[in-house]
Image (spheres, rainbow, N blue to C red):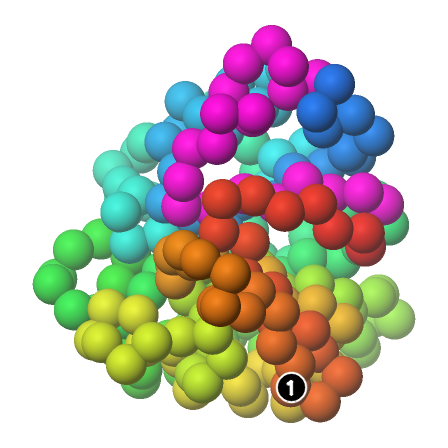
Amino acid sequence: MRVLCVSDRVEPPLYGPALRSYASGAEAVISCGDLPFEYLEYIVTLLGVPVYYVLGNHDPAPESGERPEGCIPLDGRVVDAGGAVLAGLSGSRLYSGGPNQYTERQMALRSLALSARIGGRALLGRPTPTVFVTHSPPLGLGDRKDPCHTGFRAFLRLIDRHRPALWLHGHVHLYGPGQPRALRRKDTEVLNVFGHRFVEL
């Protein structure tokens, strides 16, 4: 399944009539956060495929009631997406008290709740996630040392416990060729989709 992944920056090829031809063959879109909701709504309207999303630290809080119309939230959920099963967690490290920011302890509790949902699916014989979608990266895997862009240790435990094939994130902006997009932890590829990337699931 060909998937268009987007995060953090509005990309000219994706915000105009050329989107249909540029993203030809994409069967779904995954957003890793910090994008205008009207941008996601434009993509879902023009492509007519499911758009799944988590929220970033610059997005409105869920409590605000604002959401991208026609798009499917992943935060704290496990969702069957055609040929893949997705699990998602929104947010970044707490650094300014803004929306969608969490301490390590808070994210650890959110991760445990997500693990419990995954375990419940497994007990029922349902497939477990092949792809995790987050805004922030796991600790030490494409993150940075500043308080805002430090990754979550809790995500490492999710990788070790559930062993997804792919972990998608954004949050860390990439400028220049020297910054790696793809890293690995055991059998899991950790991919920063800043801007946009096409992936095969």
Residue 103 in the image: x percent, y percent? 26, 77
The residue lying at 49 percent from left, 68 percent from top is: 178
Asked if one can make out residue 174 in the rendered structure from this viewpoint, the answer is yes
The residue lying at 30 percent from left, 43 percent from top is: 59
Q: State which region is magenta.
A: 1-20
Task: Pick whichever, 194 or 155, lies toward us.
Answer: 194
Residue 38 horizontal side relative to residue 131, left or right: left
Residue sticking out furthest to the front = 177
Residue sticking out furthest to the left = 96
The residue lying at 41 percent from left, 22 percent from top is: 38
Task: Pick whichever, 125 or 188, lies toward us.
Answer: 188
Residue 98 in the image: x percent, y percent? 16, 55
Dot 1: element: strand
Q: Is 5 within the magenta? A: yes
Query: As displayed, is residue 200 above or below residue 120?
Result: above
Q: Quadrant of the C terminus?
A: bottom right
Q: Quadrant of the N terminus?
A: top right
Task: Pick whichever, 75 or 10, lies toward us.
Answer: 10
Residue sticking out furthest to the top = 17
Q: Which residue is mark 1?
A: 185
Q: Is 175 within the magenta? A: no
Residue 106 in the image: x percent, y percent? 31, 77
Query: As displayed, is residue 75 above or below residue 187?
Result: above
The residue lying at 27 percent from left, 41 percent from top is: 60
Asked if one can make out residue 88 in the rendered structure from this viewpoint, the answer is no
